[in-house]
Amino acid sequence: MRLAPVVDRQIDELMDLAEIENPKGSVRVNPDLEVPRYISAQDIHRMPGNYHGTYGERDVRQGAVFDRGAVVYQMGRNGGYMNDIRGHTIISHFFSRWPEGKPLRILDMGCTVGHSTLAIASYFPEAETHALDVGAGMMRYAHARAERLNIPVHFSQQNAECTDFEDESFDLITSSAMLHETSGKALPNIFKECHRLLKPGGVMAHLEVPGRYDEMDTWSRIRGDYEIQYNYEPFWKGAITADFDKLCKDAGFNDIAVGYQDATVKAERGNTQFGGPSKGVHRSWLMISGVK
């Protein structure tokens, strides 16, 4: 997959398009941010430059590469070019557990270019939605993409382990397939940061790959090991063996649920699509949720 040359041929035009007049949302980058070693040590998903590569003050290159690359990698099965089924699935889970929930301040962690973020924000137009990731170019592209799609989001370049938001700032915190890109040492920090940032009664809802190691057959374990070795997914096994219930409890959460949510292109309040066995990749996702 060689998407980078395609992006490079039009990078000047893309940077110009990313200059938004009178934006509804915003973007903050931090040139002094120290990208965690567990991300910077290798090019995750074999994407040259990884999530955080930056090539100038106006750069959007990594965002553009990731945007198309994610669609190709998923073979269109995650919502076509919008690549947003996981975002709809997160809100489907939220509605299944809290059918009357109406968050007014939302944070999406590890958002990359906002594929899931925009789906999440679309259900709550009155809410103020924030999103973060570690790459400046990723955040600039995500902001431009959101503005072009007319969904206001406030993007910032930050580490999910330790953000600059004030205590009790959010009603809902989400992430989409971020935890399996995160080290075992960082996971507890992220859950504790979610607890710090949520208002009392606020909800945390993380979506992850739909499989647990002890439920997998031999072929699935072999395929997973191939991903670890050759697709640069070093924390995949750690995520599918992690005790998420304990991580939630240790961080201070209550009303915890860990289970499978049916994938959907549209979330509806009061659905009953949570629980039961996994239906497999792209048909189910693992959800980890709890209340502060």
Image: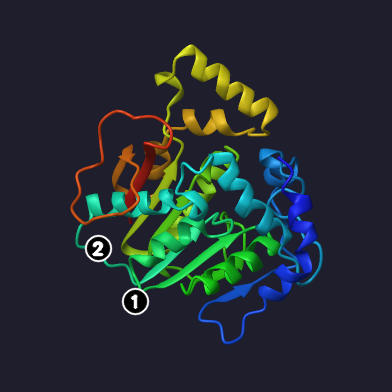
Does residue 164 appear to the left or right of 270 in the view shown? Answer: right
Instruction: Check residue 101 in the rendering and tell me which mark sits there, or answer none.
Output: 2
Instruction: Check residue 126 in the rendering and tell me which mark sits there, or answer none.
Output: 1
Does residue 154 appear to the left or right of 120 in the view shown? Answer: right
Residue at point 57% right, 87% down?
22
Question: Which amino acid does the dot numbered 2 rest on?
Answer: Gly
Question: Which amino acid does the dot numbered 1 rest on?
Answer: Glu
From the image, which quarter does the N terminus lie in?
top right
Q: Earlier in the sequence, mark 1 or mark 2?
A: 2
On the image, the x and y values in percent for residue 179 come to 52, 43
Q: Tell whether label 2 touches label 1 (CB within 8 Å).
A: no
In-front residue for pair 90/192:
90
Residue 277 in the image: above or below residue 251: above
In-front residue for pair 12/209:
12
Quick one: SS at disc 2? Answer: loop
Residue at point 30% right, 42% down?
257
Q: Given this view, does label 1 or label 2 mark the residue nearer the observer?
A: 1
- Within 10 Å of disc 2 (Cα), the crowding (few <14, some 14-19, many 20+) is some
From the image, which quarter does the C terminus lie in?
bottom left
